[in-house]
Every structure is written in C-alpha cells, then in structure tokens.
Image (tube, coloured by chain):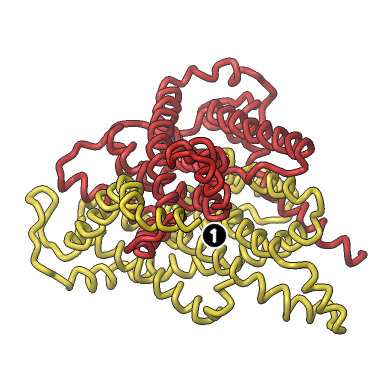
Amino acid sequence: MAEATTGRRGRGLVAYLLALPGALWLGIFFLIPMVTMFSLSLQEGSFERGYVFTGRVQNYFDALSLYDTQLYRSLIYGLIVTVVTLALSYPMAYWIALRGGRYKNLFLLLILLPFFTPFVIRTLSWKFILADEGIFLGTLKDWGILPDSYQLLATPTAVVCGMIYNFLPFMALPLYVALERLDPRLLDASNDLYSNRTQTFLKVTLPLSLPGVFAGSLLTFIPAVGDFINADLLGGVNTTMIGNVIQREFQTNLDFPTGSALSFLLMFGILVGVFIYARAIGTEELSG
Amino acid sequence: MKKGRILPIYTGLVIAYLFIPIFVMALFGFNDPVGRFNFQWHGFTLEWYRRLFDVEELVIGIKNSLLVATVSTFFATIFGTLMALAISRYKFRGRSALNLFIFIPMATPEVVLGVSLLGLFVTLQLSRGFLTLVITHILFCISYVVVTVRARTTNLDSNLEDAAQDLGADPWTTFWTVTFPLILPGIVAGAFLAFALSIDDYVISSFNAGSTITLPLWIVGASRIGVPPQVNVMGTLLFMVGVLYVVGAVIAGRRKEKLIAPPVLSKG
C-alpha cells in the first residue's frame, strides 16, 4: 500500500504526459483563438486591406450602441427559455425520479429518443408545423378558431418555443440526476416529523435539488442566449438575436472587430447573468 | 381527479409533446407532394424511401458528416480519456487549473467558439474545409469526453489496482487488465456523445466548413428553397436507430436488472 502511494506521487510526470495531447489541443484551438479574437476586437481596418491593432476600446461601445437591442433580447429570451423549461421539466423529473420505480430508465430514454433526429430537422419540423397555413394553424383557421391573419412564424413566440423544445432535455436530465440522488429516508423523516407534502417539498426536496436546478439552468441559459438557428429558421426581422448579428458580422459584413467585440459582450452578459443567479440561489446549496 | 394521477399524466403529455415534430417529420416522409414544398398532405407513397439516395448533395453531406464525426470521435475520445485519467488518478500541480480549462469551452456559446476559430484560420490563412472541420469538432468534443469518462474513473476502486500490483502485475499490465475494462463503459459513452455532438453540429461547422457540405449545413441551406422529402426519411431512419437503441437497452436492462448509461444528447 505504502509502495503504491509513493508510486502514485512519483508519477506526476505521467499525469502531465497523459494530459498533454488534450491540453495542447485546447490551448491551440481554444485559448489562442480567444486571444486572437480579443486582439481583433481592438483592431481597426477592413477585411480586404487587413486589420491593424490600435487598442481601440471604442469598438465595444460602438458595437453595444448598434446592437444593444439584440443583446438584451437574447438575454431575455434566454431567461424566458430557462424559466419555462425549468417549470416544464421539474414536475416530470420529480415524478420519474421519485415515483418512476422500475420504469425510471425507460422514461429517461423516451425523453432522449426524439433527440436522435438531427437538431436542424427537428427545428424545420417545427417550422413546418407552425407555418401560417400548416397543419396546426391552418386547421384552427379552417375551424374559425383563429383569424386568417394570425401567424406564429417570424414572431418571438415561435423562436422562444423552438428553443424551449430544443433545450428541454438539458434542463430535465440534471434535474432528474439531482432528484434521483435524494435519499427517500429524508422524505420519510420529514413526514414523521409532521410536515405536510408542501412543507416537505419546500424544506427538503427543493433545497436538495438546487444543484440540479443550477446545472440545468446553466446548460439551458448559455446555449439559448447564444443561439441563432431557432431565430434563423423560426424567426423574422424583429427576433434577431445576438448570435445572428455575430454571424452576420463575420460572414456577410466581414467586420471582424465588431463581431469579436460582440462575442465578448455576449460572454460578459452570460457571466453576469450566471453570477447573479449563483448569488441568488446561494453557493452553499450548490456544493451538494 | 385523484391527486396521484396528475403527475404521471403530466409526464406523459410532456413526452408526447417532445414527439410531435418527430411524428410530423415521419408522416411527411410518406407524403406525395405536388411541387417543391412538402407542406400539405396529398397521398401516401413509399417513393422517397426508394429514392433515398437520389439527392446527390444530401448523400455527399451524409458521407462528409459520417467521416468528420468518425475521425473527430476517434481523436477526441483518445485525448479526452487520457486527460480524464490524468485528472482523476493523479495529484499534480495545475490540476484545478486544468479542470477549469476543460470546463470553459463547454460554457462558451457555440457561436463564439465558431467565430473565434474562423478568426484563427483566417489569420493563419488556412483554407477552410475538411481539415478545419475535423480540428474544430475534436475541440468541442474533448471536454464532453473528459467529463463523461471522469464520472467513471473517479468512482473506480483503487484497491483493485493495488491488488493487481500486489500480485505482481506491472503498471502497464494493471492498466490493460484492470483499469481499462472497468472504465470502458465510460469511454464508450464518451465516444457516443462525441459522435452525436459532431454529427449534429450546425453552428460551429457553418463558420469553418468552407465549401465542404455536412448534413446539417446542407439541410439548412436547402430549407430556403424547399427541403426534399428524403430529408424526412433520413430523420425518420435516424430516429429508428434511437428506437432500436431504447428497445435494446430495455431488453439488456431486463436481463441485467440494470440499464446501460443514458445515451447521448444532441446539442443545439
């Protein structure tokens, strides 16, 4: 035993060698691009004639004043998507984890099953369903329930609904994992001590599931704020998100400095959101 | 309604909701549309299953996607597994920094990852195509492999390895006969996850593919002018792979009274 311990300590070099290929890859293709992009965000010039580093911080203020609407819109959409997916998946995760019995895994697999179909096909399928004269709205219009002019596509509702659908498993799975880990004896204890169902839920179940709530929220909020395909396929001119703007700056306008500045503003926005959320939910509960 | 009935019914409804677009997609793979847009039901046909490989670019896209996913999964799984072993089996200086370094790419929005790599490739004047696709896919898969494999390696009972060593096995033999078989399910799960993430990726690829077409890229491009029903068929067939997986997992679970690790998630 003593030999094994000293052996493990002496093998520090082995650890570095093991981590080397992956760390190099992340260093070259994550860290360096980030540094490059940070430098780009402070440059001036044009794509054709090349950019020159001038340390122009004004790029950030210019980008913010031009695209503040899209940035705030993305943060708000991300917030709505996170809250709605949380509300939608919590009761389901709760039931599967605590009452699912021997079918727990089957239910989990059923939640994951639709996601075997590629993301873009699922989203296009929603576009098809929500189309003005499609099977859903078309039918409701034929029955006279909706006015003929009613439309869902190209509205914020369609974009937010698309994201809610696509990100639901990212919320449901961490919630399930946290609730599944819950010791049922704690719930029994709470009942034995004369608390009713609501009290047990609020004082035992909910606090213990907070790590899952936090993890799920991050996994939903971050991709939702940065998303642009849902807005691209389901949205219109007044649902443009910051991801769409960044894409346009890089691919159409070829304005790399503005696009880079927007990328950092987006990450900053996400960071602030996550920080406020972590503070609100309390870091002590998250260590579980 | 009885109190105990609400939650199961609710769960059923949410699951049904998750299947709505899949059902519609599958249904319209059997539709016999008039014109370019597959929007209204006209009649049942198996035509699109028969002519699945008639759309040349779709076939190229699928081939490219499979190729990129296979190569990226191979490297990401190796790099990720080695890193997971380093982090969970050894104490070394910079370990927590490495942990953070692995986490940050997962917490970065895909669009930011995509454009930062585009910026790098443009700066290096590296033309974009198959190579850059593989480079970027390995990058965004590594962290997920590390997390998946690490979940397995941390729970490993190191007494088993010590026992092997006490019985005279050298570290190399110990690794291949004890450690590796024990963590293999984690490696397989990590590889599946990497493959699914790669084959499903649209955002990062859209910046770094150059003129190389992948399945998601082609579908989004085609959606502007009308998606051929073959896309529905393709989606349906992929979904059926999932169904087979679930059926297999349930049967295996019955047999072992323990289900296989949850399958992979596709990411937006």
Relative horizontal placement of residue A193, taking residue A22 as reference (left or right): right
Q: Looking at this view, is A225 or A219 the one in front?
A: A219
Q: Decide: is A130 above or below B55.
A: below
Q: Which chain is yellow?
A: A
Q: Which residue is mark 1?
A: A160
Image coordinates of residue A143 in percent, x first then y, are 75, 49
Give the number of callouts: 1
Tell me what hue chain B is rendered in. red
Position in image of residue B11 (x %, y %): 76, 56
- Which chain does the numbered disc 1 sit on? A
The one nearer the camera, A219 or A49, is A219
| Residue drawn where x is 52% and y is 78% of the image | A283
Spot the residue most to the right: B2
Q: Between residues A63 and A131, which one lies in front from this camera angle? A: A63
Viewer can see residue B178: yes
Front residue of B149/A106: it is B149
Amino acid beneath label 1: Val
Q: Quadrant of residue A58?
A: bottom left
Task: From this view, report whether residue A92 is shown above or below residue A129.
Answer: below
